[in-house]
């Protein structure tokens, strides 16, 4: 018999077995399998055909093959026999080596055959990939744990969408090799929290679908677990060596582990396996560095294992990755959207996401002194102080954030201990409050007088973690800082912008005394805004000379607003020439509003020619709004012709918006042709609104076809709002399918309002089912307001259970306002405890209004005690305005406080504002 006939005989036997459904009796490693059919396995059929082809090409008989493979003659015969069970991995590997066949591919076929036979062994460490929680594999959670709308549901650990980068493609190739039967190892190298572990998790997902296992050795220690069980790892297993320094760098067993991993990779009968590890760059350098001559080589096996098998992970997202992250954010990924607000500039997205939960944990569990310093920093940033916060300011500001008991326990070195505590790093090399060194600005010298630069703050400077700053803007937004904060600001802050922003913050909180003192300090340190405000106060008090002196100081420091104010004062004093000169100076420095105010004065004085000349000067400097405002004045005076002439001048200087007004004038005068020509001019300059107005004119004239064509032009140029009118026209014409298609087009471009408005049309027509279907489509595209609308529809139909489910969906997607309606529904059902729990959830997410509104419901029901308890909870979570409500409820008369409030909310005793300075140093 020829060799080709031998091969054909073996293949024929395999095919006969497929048809004959013969039974196998022995499985992997000698395990007996009863009642299973080997003939039904396509993988086993292909495996034996490839062995038979290899046998024919090698021109060997089974006896010769057995001898060269160092196997028994019976073992080889059964491996090739169509009536025998799946051969062992060792047998397949030995035969493949002798026949020069790809060992990995044949082992993968063998494993698939075992799976198809339903005889997958339970041996080997690990469990199926799909049974793992990524956080249990040390993938960092991102953001704070999110509480679901149901109070009884555990906190959800967040995992944002994934942005593939260049290293993910190379990692994916290794995964595909493993899936094809070739054992691989890849170690990702990158700094802390650069996304290494998450990349590994995403990479193994295709293997999860193929039933692969994953083993993460960590008990009792990582190194001990690896030494104990690496020899037990079976085929189709991912070996998860996260933080591989714990394995390879172990002084006792690191080299043994490296050798065992190497043996696993080069033993075909144990494969395929995929070994994934992560390392920091400093460890990778340590393990791969060659030893000096004559010294020990503690990492020789680790160096061999890592050679050519590492993959670098970059520190930051590049432009392409940031664009992909932005797409995820726009699709509703709130974690990604939040991270982009903080890390878009430097691209350190993964570090931001990984560090956020631990930063919040460190804040919440900080020592009293450290928390006081941190909250002072939070309040400073949210109220407008710059990035760099001086240690002297923070230390003095922090004291009133402590209660008396904690204050009494402060030691002499409390501040040092607090700053040391807050400097400890979390994931991503972030700290709650880190020392920083501001860079000196490098700007060209000014061409003219400008605001004097602020002197650099003295002493150490600190920077608050971006995540904590963002967190505080929500959770502390209703809080007014204590007295020590304002005192420290007045004592230590010197930057005009910082002082100016705090002045506005104090004034907005009716802390009038501190606002006044801070404004004076800001003026002293060169704030032209503060000087201007003080000047206005002087003028109102009748001190025109003092006011003018202050405005001149501000003008000398580069304030064009002050120049404009001086021009107004000169004009009111009858010095028109001086006023115009000052206004021109302001305009030359870029403030053309000064020219408008002069033009306004000229117009009111009857000098229309002079007014128009000044307006043209402003327009020549790029401010056509001055011409428009002058046209408004003329139109109000009934001079339509004069107004139109001025608008023409603005249009000739490129102001497209005025073309609408001119067109409206033409249309009101019955000149439709002239109006249409003007709308066309605006459209030619890129205005899609003009196209919409043109379409409305055509539709009004009965040309629906022409109107629809123009609307389509506007839609093609990116105006999704016109799609609603198009959809409306389709709906009116009875083409409901066309209307829906247009609404979906708008939604696909990010405008779900068109779907909602079309849904409202159907709802109004009595088609509740059709309306709900459209609302659903808008909700699926991320519009939580639509979920609320749907819930209201359900509630109106008497389906309270369905309505509540939809409200919960909206709440879970971040809409805290709906928690009030859920709380109200609980209250109506008599579940007061559930209602309070929901209101507290909203408050914990920064929305204390829900607690307040629920309190009002209880107050109206006559439950003053319950209402007060809820108001108290809102106050405890930072809502200061509810303190006024508490005062009302206790029948404390609240009058208008002419002297303002102290930082603690009590009325400020009468005080005499100091006079504004007239000469500043």
Image (tube, rainbow, N blue to C red):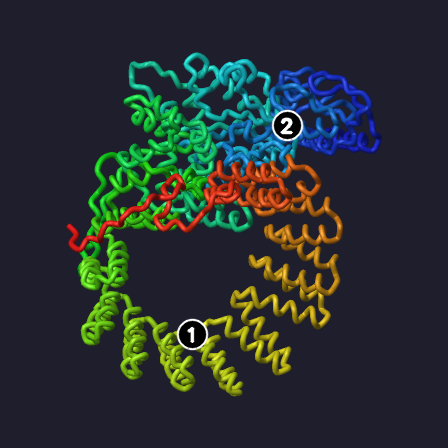
Q: Secondary structure at mark 1?
A: loop
For the residues bearing labels 1 and 2, Cβ distance under 8 angstroms: no
- Front in this rendered view, residue 415 or 91: 415
User: Which residue sits at x=36%, y=23%?
Assistant: 286
Residue at the disc numbered 1: 656
Expressed as whole percent of the image width and height from the top left, the position of residue 741 reads 66, 63
- On screen, residue 134 above or below 797: above
Percent across and percent down for residue 569 are 23, 68
Residue 275 vertical placement versus 835 (above, below): above
Q: Where in the figure is residue 84, as x and y percent of width and height?
A: 76, 22
Residue 583: x and y, percent? 24, 70
Q: Residues within 10 Å of mark 1 (few under 14, many from 20)?
A: many
| Residue sitting nearer the eye, 895 or 291 | 895
Q: Is residue 71 above or below residue 900?
A: above
Q: Quadrant of residue 71?
A: top right
Left or right: residue 612 versus residue 195 is left
Residue 128, label in figure: 2
With respect to residue 574, does 317 lie above or below? above
């Amino acid at each position: 018999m020829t060799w080709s006939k031998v091969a054909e005989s073996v293949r024929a036997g395999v095919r006969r077995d497929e048809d004959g459904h013969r039974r196998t009796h022995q499985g992997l490693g000698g395990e007996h399998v009863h009642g299973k059919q080997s003939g039904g396995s396509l993988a086993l059929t292909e495996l034996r055909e490839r062995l038979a082809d290899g046998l024919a090409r090698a021109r060997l008989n089974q006896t010769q093959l057995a001898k060269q493979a160092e196997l028994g003659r019976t073992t080889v015969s059964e491996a090739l026999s169509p009536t025998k069970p799946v051969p062992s991995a060792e047998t397949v590997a030995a035969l493949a080596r002798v026949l020069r066949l790809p060992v990995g591919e044949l082992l993968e076929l063998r494993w698939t055959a075992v799976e198809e036979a339903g005889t997958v062994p339970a041996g080997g460490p690990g469990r199926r990939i799909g049974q793992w929680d990524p956080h249990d594999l040390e993938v960092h959670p991102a953001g704070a744990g999110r509480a679901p709308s149901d109070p009884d549901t555990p906190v959800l650990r967040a995992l944002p969408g994934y942005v593939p980068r260049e290293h993910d493609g190379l990692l994916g190739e290794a995964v595909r090799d493993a899936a094809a039967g070739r054992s691989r190892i890849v170690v990702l190298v990158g700094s802390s929290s650069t996304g290494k572990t998450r990349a590994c998790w995403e990479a193994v997902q295709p293997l999860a679908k193929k039933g692969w296992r994953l083993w993460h050795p960590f008990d009792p220690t990582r190194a001990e677990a690896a030494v104990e069980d690496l020899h037990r790892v079976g085929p189709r297993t991912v070996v998860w060596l996260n933080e591989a320094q714990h394995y390879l760098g172990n002084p006792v067993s690191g080299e043994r582990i490296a050798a065992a991993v190497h043996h696993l990779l080069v033993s075909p009968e144990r494969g395929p396996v995929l070994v994934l590890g992560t390392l920091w760059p400093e460890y990778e350098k340590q393990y791969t560095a060659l030893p000096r001559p004559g010294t020990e080589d503690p990492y020789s096996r680790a160096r061999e294992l890592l050679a050519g098998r590492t993959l670098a992970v970059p520190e930051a997202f590049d432009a392409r990755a940031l664009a992909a992250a932005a797409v995820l954010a726009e699709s509703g990924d709130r974690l990604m959207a939040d991270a982009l607000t903080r890390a878009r500039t430097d691209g350190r997205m993964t570090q931001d996401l990984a560090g956020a939960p631990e930063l919040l944990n460190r804040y919440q569990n900080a020592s009293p002194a450290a928390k006081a310093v941190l909250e002072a920093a939070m309040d400073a940033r949210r109220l407008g102080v710059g990035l760099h916060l001086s240690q002297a300011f923070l230390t003095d500001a922090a004291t009133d954030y402590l209660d008396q008991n904690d204050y009494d326990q402060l030691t002499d070195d409390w501040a040092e201990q607090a700053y040391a505590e807050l400097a400890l790093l979390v994931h991503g090399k972030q700290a709650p409050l880190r020392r920083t060194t501001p860079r000196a600005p490098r700007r060209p010298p000014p061409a003219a007088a400008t605001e004097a630069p602020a002197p650099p703050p003295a002493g150490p400077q600190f920077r608050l973690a971006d995540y904590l700053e963002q967190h505080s803007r929500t959770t502390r937004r209703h809080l007014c800082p204590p007295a020590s904060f304002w005192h420290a600001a007045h004592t230590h802050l010197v930057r005009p912008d910082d002082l100016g922003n705090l002045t506005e913050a104090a004034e907005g909180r009716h802390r009038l005394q501190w606002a006044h003192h801070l404004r004076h300090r800001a003026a002293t340190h060169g704030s032209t805004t503060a000087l201007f405000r003080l000047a206005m106060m002087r003028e109102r008090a009748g001190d025109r000379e003092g006011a003018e002196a202050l405005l001149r100081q501000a003008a000398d420091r580069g304030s064009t607003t002050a120049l404009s104010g001086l021009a107004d004062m000169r004009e009111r004093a009858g010095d028109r020439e001086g006023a115009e000169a000052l206004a021109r100076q302001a305009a030359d420095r870029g403030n053309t509003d000064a020219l408008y105010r002069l033009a306004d004065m000229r117009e009111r004085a009857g000098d229309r020619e002079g007014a128009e000349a000044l307006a043209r000067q402003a327009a020549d400097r790029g401010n056509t709004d001055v011409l428009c405002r002058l046209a408004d004045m003329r139109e109000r005076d009934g001079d339509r012709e004069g107004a139109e002439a001025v608008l023409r001048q603005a249009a000739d200087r490129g102001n497209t918006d005025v073309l609408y007004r001119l067109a409206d004038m033409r249309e009101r005068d019955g000149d439709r042709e002239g109006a249409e020509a003007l709308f066309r001019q605006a459209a030619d300059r890129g205005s899609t609104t003009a196209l919409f107005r043109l379409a409305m004119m055509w539709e009004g004239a009965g040309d629906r076809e022409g109107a629809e064509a123009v609307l389509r032009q506007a839609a093609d140029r990116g105006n999704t709002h016109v799609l609603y009118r198009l959809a409306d026209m389709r709906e009116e014409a009875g083409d409901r399918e066309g209307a829906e298609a247009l609404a979906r087009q708008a939604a696909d471009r990010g405008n779900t309002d068109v779907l909602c408005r079309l849904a409202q049309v159907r709802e109004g027509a009595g088609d509740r089912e059709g309306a709900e279907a459209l609302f659903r489509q808008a909700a699926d595209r991320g519009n939580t307001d639509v979920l609320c609308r749907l819930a209201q529809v359900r509630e109106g139909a008497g389906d309270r259970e369905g309505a509540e489910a939809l409200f919960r969906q909206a709440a879970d997607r971040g809409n805290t306002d709906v928690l009030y309606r859920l709380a109200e529904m609980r209250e109506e059902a008599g579940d007061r405890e559930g209602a309070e729990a929901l209101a507290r959830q909203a408050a914990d997410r920064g929305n204390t209004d829900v607690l307040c509104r629920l309190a009002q419901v209880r107050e109206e029901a006559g439950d003053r005690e319950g209402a007060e308890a809820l108001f108290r909870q809102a106050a405890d979570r930072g809502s200061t305005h509810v303190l006024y409500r508490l005062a009302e409820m206790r029948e404390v008369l609240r009058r208008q406080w002419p002297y303002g409030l102290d930082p603690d909310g009590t009325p400020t005793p009468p005080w005499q504002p100091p006079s504004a300075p007239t000469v500043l140093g």
